[in-house]
Amino acid sequence: MLDTQQIMKTALKLAHFRSIPADSEVHVKGRKLRRVLVAIDVGVGELLLAQNLNCDGVIAHHPAGGKAQLEGYKVFLRHIDQMRAAGVPLEVAREAVKNKYRVLDIQHHPENYDQVPNAAKKLGLPLVTIHSPCDEIGRRLIVQAIKGLNADATVGQLVSKIGAFPEFRSAETRIEVRLGSPNRKAGKVVISHACYTNGGYDVAKAYFQHGVDTLSYIHVSEPDLTRLASENFANLIVLGHIASDWLGINRLLGELKKKDVEPVASTDLYKPA
């Protein structure tokens, strides 16, 4: 059995994070948690479901309120570090995140950050949001899995390697090659995940203009994709949002089970370790 803070620390350790990022939060503290509902999105309905299923706590993936919902977009700046690691110059990386960062700030400011955490308090249910740590766990798993690809590997072979994870095999969505072709050489690959949301057109363009041949996003908007396609950039693969999220979440839940916490998942994409 763990308390809410120990659950958060377990996620941070798996993600190699030193502190709680802006998009994650312990909303309602709790101790001796034995059975927890785990869901990508948690609202009042999921809290009532947890109560009905005799759970004594809830773990949300996407920010379920509080500062994580209002200020979680600050994690978007992690794109700068990932771009720098791939060889994108610092000033180019900073410029690439500027527009979308401003949009995210404006979008989140009016949101109802108070409703779900207060409902959890009234129901007596501990509530935790764990977002980018789980995404980083998943990103690291993918990076490790594709290390074995040889220099002549194609985009299709890259997709097959990533698609071997059970979360992707079981998902209703498929990994899509949104730009380029499965027959093209994958070349230099970057897994651009765990930065709150995808980097959109500007971040992808920065990668492609600085030596990246294949970029992986979890999801991408149609306008961004259309702009990238019109400029004939290289390969973009899109893994699928929900399957990608559960990839990291499942690894966290495996660790929690070792510590006598029973996860009750809201999906068939829960793959017990």
Image (tube, rainbow, N blue to C red):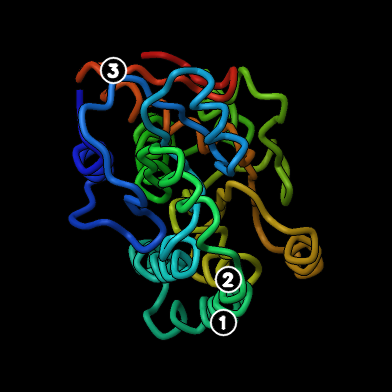
Q: Using the image as rendered, state which of residue 153 and residue 208 is in the foreground.
A: 208
At 79% from the left and 59% from the top, the residue drawn is 222
Answer above or below: position of 32 versus 77: above
- Residue 102's tag is 1
Q: Position of residue 27 (x, y in %)?
A: 36, 52
> Is residue 164 at least partly visible in the picture?
no
Q: Residues within 10 Å of mark 2 (few under 14, many from 20)?
A: some
Query: Which residue type carries mark 3?
Result: Lys
Q: Secondary structure at mark 2?
A: helix
> Which amino acid lies under the numbered mark 1 shown in the image of this protein?
Arg
Q: Check disc 2 and report the residue beneath it.
A: 108
Disc on res. 257? 3
Residue 195 spot, x, y in % from top left: 45, 59
- Local SS, label 3: helix
Q: Amino acid at mark 2?
A: His
Image quadrant holding the N terminus, namely top left
Q: Position of residue 207 (x, y in %)?
A: 52, 66
Which comes sooner in the sequence, label 2 or label 3?
A: 2
CA gap, disc 1 to disc 2?
A: 10 Å
